[in-house]
């Protein structure tokens, strides 16, 4: 075991995390501030017998990684806002066809071309609901370079195990931050996809209690049909109302069944907190310091930070917010997380949104100032 | 022939289409007389004569009546999104060079929404075959104009006749670098089968334009007759007198050339990628 730390930029940590997780296919299209991931993957993948391809756009990138994954290879793409928007239709395909894949979205200012080189956190609702229709999706929000490395690995593990697309989102600052990373041992075991055996009565979308169907690898003899049309357990299109209801509910229940292993969060000083700060990613780093400063001033502040944004760790948040007289939500958007908290808490606790949309990161001082205001009121 | 998995040493014997279909899905969705069925048969016939194992055949299709055809094939079938089957197939083939990859798409799927993917697939020259079933119309969505709808034709979105010029898809594919380019009509099923065989056996990106017909919607709207008349008029000089004067109302006013237009020995993308010095076999 190496206890050594390797200095890495966030985007390079992401690429090396993917390689460590067994990623052997990358399809992408350059976009600031994510391009270093593609550049690093183009160098690393050939060394491990994997394939890198720069596709003609992000629609094609998303399609290509799904194609590679359907062939049995762990696959990933990386992008930023405009490209993430273009990926949405095929992201829905991955959700309904249950194709494991990992999408990195390095957030920048939006909408549209917005501010390519400035950080933002404005894609969290798009990541949940960007593609049309009810669908399962997992979204992870690391806050440090180490976490980018670890959560990228976890993204592959969840994607493979649960046959679901997993999005990892961080912002331009973490992407280009240089921090020490403890790397995973080269021989660490990989999480394997649930593969179909040689059973004669195999049905590609039938499941047991875990609600995850076993996947047939092309060439292994099952000759499966995969489609983005709503399909029955045999994999073929159906509009039979009871079947449609059954298969769609199973698809949505799949993540609920595995919530315990998907959810991840950090709670700091929440037990006796009068004011709970809830935020994620880069803003949570400022919040952690703000909570410390506030405590030194006698303000009982605490921090709750979801590392899994979707499905949202609802129970954990409610537990952390118990006893709090107010909740403060600093985030680099106009209030997307705070809107979500109104749904989850719904107990009358005042929720104060501190949305910042000027392309500048939120500072600890700004958060402390709001904490003082809230205490004063 | 390259990278085509064949039944070792076996003589393929007479072609029986039932051996290659998912019979449990019958009856199929196609309208009587739809040319897409002939294209499907030609593909399966070619697969049979090439001796490709069904387990090693991957059929990737887009969205449209053309895209729905793939599901009937007893192979690894992937019905993807509108316009994107080539991009899905690119990932699949790069991950699994051992599979024979055939893409089935329509004129709208390949030339309108998927036009960008088409030209780049031609340029890259990854070893796969695209069958573009050209019926001059958006069949699945009820008969709207497509990039190959002939001038003056009526569609549901050109109520007074189409005023847009058409794409010559074969010239587009050849100019974009496809190393195999051919066109055939459904009238001549054995010739179509032979073209598809050549295309699949070709090592590189193969583009095959199949002149299909949408009898039910496009044919009816433009008074082009029943299926036999439409199919026969694909080759004007082969249309017998019994079907009337082709000059009045031929399905395709300008007779399109058929056959092989390009057959080049260009480096195949997957092989080139894997030949780079940095590449280690995983
Ligand atoms: C993104 C998207 N846009 C539009 C559609 C609707 N749509 C389905 S098939 C089709 C056109 C199909 O035409 P073509 O590719 O020529 O196939 P054909 O049905 O004629 O075989 C369209 C526009 C869709 N499914 N997805
Ligand atoms: S609508 Fe046209 S293209 Fe579609 S199945 Fe019917 S005849 Fe064929
Ligand atoms: Mg068409």
Image: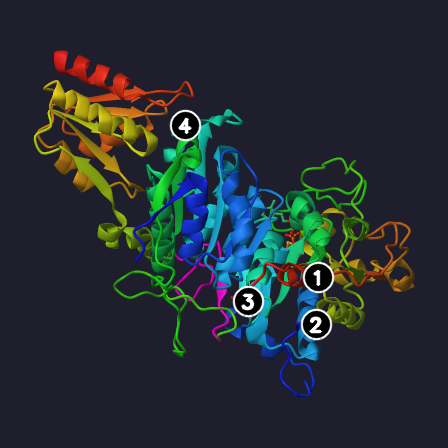
How far is the residue under mark 3 from the one under mark 4? 40 Å
How far is the residue under mark 1 from the one under mark 4? 42 Å
In magenta stretch: residue A234: yes
Please say if the residues under marks 1 and 3 sit with CB atoms less than 8 Å apart.
Answer: no
Q: From this viewpoint, is residue B27 visible?
A: no
Q: Give the letter of the chain under mark 2.
A: B
* Of pointers 2 and 3, the one earlier in the residue sequence: 2
Q: Which residue is mark 2?
A: B2
Q: Which residue is mark 1?
A: B268
Nearer to us of marks 1 and 3 is 3
In magenta stretch: residue A374: no
Q: Which residue is mark 4?
A: A120
Please say if the residues under marks 3 and 4 sit with CB atoms less than 8 Å apart.
Answer: no
User: As rendered, which of A244 and B8 lies closer to the eye?
Assistant: B8
Q: Which residue is mark 3?
A: B281
How far is the residue under mark 2 from the one under mark 3? 20 Å
Give the label on residue B68, or none.
none
A163 to the left or right of A220: left
Number of numbered labels in the structure image: 4
User: As rendered, which of B103 and A149 lies closer to the eye?
Assistant: A149
> Considering only vertical position in the picture, is A109 above or below B180?
above
Q: Position of residue A56 (x, y in %)?
A: 63, 44
Q: Give the letter of the chain under mark 3.
A: B
A352 to the left or right of B40: left
How far is the residue under mark 1 from the one under mark 3? 18 Å
């Amino acid at each position: 075991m190496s206890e050594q730390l390797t200095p890495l930029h966030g985007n390079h940590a992401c690429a090396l995390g993917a390689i460590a997780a067994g990623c052997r296919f990358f399809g992408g299209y350059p976009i600031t501030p994510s391009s270093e991931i593609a550049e690093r993957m183009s160098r690393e993948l050939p060394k491990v017998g994997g394939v890198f391809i720069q596709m003609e756009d992000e629609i094609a990138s998303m399609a290509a990684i799904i194609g590679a994954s359907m062939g049995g290879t762990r696959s990933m793409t990386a992008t930023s806002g405009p490209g993430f928007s273009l990926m949405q239709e095929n992201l829905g395909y991955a959700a309904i066809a249950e194709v494991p894949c990992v999408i990195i979205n390095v957030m920048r200012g939006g909408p549209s071309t917005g501010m390519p080189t400035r950080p933002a956190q404005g894609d969290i609702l798009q990541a949940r609901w960007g593609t049309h229709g009810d669908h399962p999706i997992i979204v992870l929000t690391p806050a440090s370079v180490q976490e980018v490395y670890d959560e990228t690995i976890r993204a592959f593990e969840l994607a493979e195990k649960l046959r679901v697309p997993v999005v990892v989102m961080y912002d331009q600052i973490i992407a280009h931050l240089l921090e020490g990373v403890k790397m995973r041992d080269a021989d660490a075991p990989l999480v394997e996809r649930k593969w179909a055996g040689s059973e004669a009565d195999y049905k590609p979308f039938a499941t047991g209690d875990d609600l995850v169907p076993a996947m047939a690898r092309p060439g292994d003899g099952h000759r499966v049909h995969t489609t983005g049309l709503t399909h029955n357990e045999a994999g073929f299109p159906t509009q039979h109302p009871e079947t449609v209801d059954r298969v769609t509910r199973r698809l949505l229940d799949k993540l609920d069944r595995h919530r315990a292993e998907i959810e991840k969060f950090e709670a700091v000083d929440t037990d006796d907190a009068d004011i709970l700060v809830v935020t994620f990613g880069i803003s949570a780093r400022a919040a952690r310091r703000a909570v410390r400063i506030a405590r030194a001033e006698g303000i009982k502040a605490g921090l709750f930070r979801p590392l899994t944004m979707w499905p949202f760790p609802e129970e954990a948040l409610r537990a952390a917010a118990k006893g709090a007289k107010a909740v403060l939500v600093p985030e680099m958007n106009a209030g997307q997380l705070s809107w979500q908290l109104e749904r989850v808490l719904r107990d009358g606790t005042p929720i104060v949104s501190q949305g910042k949309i000027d392309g500048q990161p939120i500072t600890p001082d700004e958060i402390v100032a709001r904490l003082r205001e809230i205490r004063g009121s | 022939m390259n990278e085509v998995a064949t039944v070792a040493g076996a003589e393929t014997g007479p072609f029986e289409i039932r051996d290659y279909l998912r019979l449990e899905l019958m009856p199929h969705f196609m309208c009587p007389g739809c040319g897409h069925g002939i294209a499907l048969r030609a593909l399966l016939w070619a697969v049979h004569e090439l001796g490709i194992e069904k387990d090693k055949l991957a059929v990737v299709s887009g969205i449209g009546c053309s895209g729905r055809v793939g599901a009937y094939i007893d192979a690894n079938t992937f019905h993807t999104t509108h316009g994107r089957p080539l991009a899905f197939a690119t990932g699949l083939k790069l991950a699994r060079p051992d599979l024979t990859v055939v893409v089935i798409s329509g004129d709208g799927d390949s030339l309108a929404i998927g036009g960008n993917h088409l030209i780049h697939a031609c340029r890259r020259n990854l070893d796969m075959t695209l069958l573009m079933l050209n019926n001059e119309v958006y069949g699945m969505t009820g008969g709207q104009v497509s990039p190959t709808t002939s001038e003056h034709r009526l569609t549901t979105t050109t109520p007074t006749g189409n005023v847009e010029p058409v794409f010559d898809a074969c010239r587009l594919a050849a100019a974009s670098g496809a190393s195999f380019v051919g066109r055939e009509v459904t009238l001549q099923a054995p010739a179509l089968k032979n073209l598809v065989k050549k295309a699949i056996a070709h090592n590189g990106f193969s583009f095959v334009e199949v002149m299909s017909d949408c009898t039910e919607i496009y044919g009816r709207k433009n008074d082009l007759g029943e299926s036999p008349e439409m199919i026969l008029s694909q080759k004007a000089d082969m249309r017998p007198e019994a079907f009337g004067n082709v000059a009045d109302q031929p399905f395709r006013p300008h007779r399109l050339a058929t056959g092989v237009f390009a057959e080049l020995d260009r480096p195949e993308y997957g092989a080139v990628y894997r030949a780079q010095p940095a590449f280690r076999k995983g």
